[in-house]
Amino acid sequence: MYDIIIVGAGPAGLSAAIYGQRAGKKTAVFESYSYGGQIVNTPEIENYPAIKKISGFDYATALYEQASELGAEVIFDKVESVSVKDGSESTDGKLFEVKTLGGVYEAKAVILATGAKNRHLGVDREEALTGRGVSYCATCDGAFYKGKDVAVNGGGNTALEDAMFLTNYCNKVYVIHRRDEFRGEKETLLALQKKDNVEFVLNSNVVKLLGEDRLSGIEVRNKLTEEVREINVDCLFVAIGQEPDNQAFKDVAELDKAGYIISGESCTTKTPGLFTAGDCRTKQVRQLVTAASDGAVAALAACSYVDML
């Protein structure tokens, strides 16, 4: 029996564990892979307040150790479902039943912090070059390519905003899109079209990543002409969306069309006692600092809920 069970050991989940433990609650964090979430793939973090520079791995490790030293249990096991336990209504309130591959656990409150995975291109060596010239976060890594040539792949708001951001640092920005029209906002597109250091490569897909230990360029194929073009770039920023993994919780948490848990800044869900934090929920800004913030908000709300039982 736990006061709070947290699903996901990324920055949001581990931050929630820290706040839960500091409030005197018995807290467990379940993680099916490894602690840290996506941030472990970031070579250097330079936009987190009060920390000038740190690697994603070192940051995640420090967060994990802090939560563990405070007494949070980090259990590496995949959560398959979360439900309100039948017949658990009592003076102590309703209990949640958390089923994992390894067993069944109970908690007075649950925080879903499952994160979201960046949608990948699906080309050869993409994983091997992640953090070595392939990035999924322009605001995280863009400054490392000051004065360099880079490419952005995508056609939505994120891709256009990433390209606009990169024009402030990079020598040239290639914008690669599989169509000839963009889904992103017209105002951003018009502003981008006025930039001297931007080239649009339309009706095209990235088909090959070049380079050995680091990315040195990409090959793109025009869908209409089948022409293959080699473009020399130091980084490819992939901005084709993210994929949350929340289907296992759809009975207790309302999901939007994209699969994100519907929740505002309060981090509450439709089910009393069930909270959510980080990239898995509906939100405008998905950054390391907002994930940590969500973890604190969700944990304090969960603590208040447990105290009222």
Image: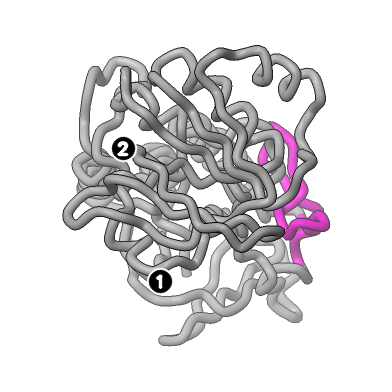
Count neighbours of disc 1 (C-alpha within 10 A) and say few if under 14, some if 14 to 19, many if 20 or more. some
Q: Does dot 2 land on a helix, a strand or a loop?
A: loop
- The residue labelled by disc 1 is 32
**Image position of 206 with respect to 157: above or below:** below
Instruction: Residue 43: name its quadrant.
Output: top left
Q: Is residue 256 magenta?
A: yes
Point out the stretch of residues depicted in magenta: 252-271
Q: Give how far across and how far down residue 147 sits, in percent.
A: 31, 18
**Image position of 216 with respect to 112: above or below:** above
What is the image's colouring?
one colour
The earlier-in-sequence mark between 2 and 1 is 1
Q: Give how far across and how far down residue 130 sits, in percent.
A: 33, 53
- Which sits in the foreground, 215 or 282? 215
Q: Give how far across and how far down residue 111 sits, in percent.
A: 57, 54
Q: What residue is at 39 percent from the left and 76 percent from the top?
A: 77
Disc number at residue 258? Answer: none
Q: Give how far across and how far down residue 37 sits, in percent.
A: 39, 53
Count neighbours of disc 2 (C-alpha within 10 A) and say few if under 14, some if 14 to 19, many if 20 or more. some
- Which sits in the foreground, 55 or 188? 188
Q: What residue is at 55 percent from the left and 23 percent from the top?
A: 198
Q: Is residue 115 left or right of residue 256?
A: left
Instruction: Assess whether mark 1 and mark 2 are in contact (beta carbons under 8 angstroms).
Output: no
- Which sits in the foreground, 19 or 130? 130
Question: At label 2, which amino acid type do we have?
Answer: Asp
Q: What residue is at 74 percent from the left and 36 percent from the top?
A: 264
Q: Is residue 121 visible?
A: yes
Disc number at residue 234? Answer: 2
Q: Is residue 246 magenta?
A: no
Q: Is residue 20 visible?
A: no
Q: Main secondary structure of the magenta part?
A: loop
Q: Is residue 146 left or right of residue 208?
A: left
Q: Does dot 1 land on a helix, a strand or a loop?
A: loop
